[in-house]
Amino acid sequence: MSETTTWTVTGMTCGHCEASVREEISEIPGVTAVEAHHQTGEVVVTSDAPLDRDAVAAAVEEAGYALT
């Protein structure tokens, strides 16, 4: 069973930003898919189990952005 969670990320302004966020979040164990949309700031994450918010925040920060 998979879980889908939508997060809001600030600071994304282009496709490169989206790719950076997708890459970092994809490295979290259990993540199966990531969609990032700089126009809305939304990041939709599908995973095998619920994700720890701190893990997602750390991945987003590693990419240079902030989870709100």
Image (cartoon, rainbow, N blue to C red):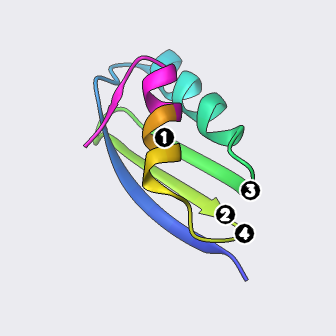
Residue at (68, 53) in percent of width and height: 33
| Mark nearer the viewer, 2 or 1 | 2
Expressed as whole percent of the image width and height from the top left, the position of residue 26 reads: 68, 41
Position of 24 relative to 30 (above/below)? above
Q: Which residue is mark 1?
A: 36
At label 4, which amino acid type do we have?
Asp
Q: Amino acid at mark 3?
A: Thr
Q: Residues within 10 Å of mark 1 (few under 14, many from 20)?
A: many
Comparing labels 4 and 3, the label whose residue is closer to the camera: 4
Q: Quadrant of the C terminus?
A: top left
Provide the residue span drawn in magenta. 59-68
Residue bearing the label numbered 2: 47
Q: Which image quadrant is residue 64 in?
A: top left
Secondary structure at numbered mark 1? strand
Q: Which residue is mark 3?
A: 32
Q: Amino acid at mark 1?
A: Ala
Contact between labelled residues 3 and 4, with CB atoms less than 8 Å apart = yes
The residue positioned 74% from the left and 58% from the top of the image is: 30
The residue singled out by tag 4 in the image is 48
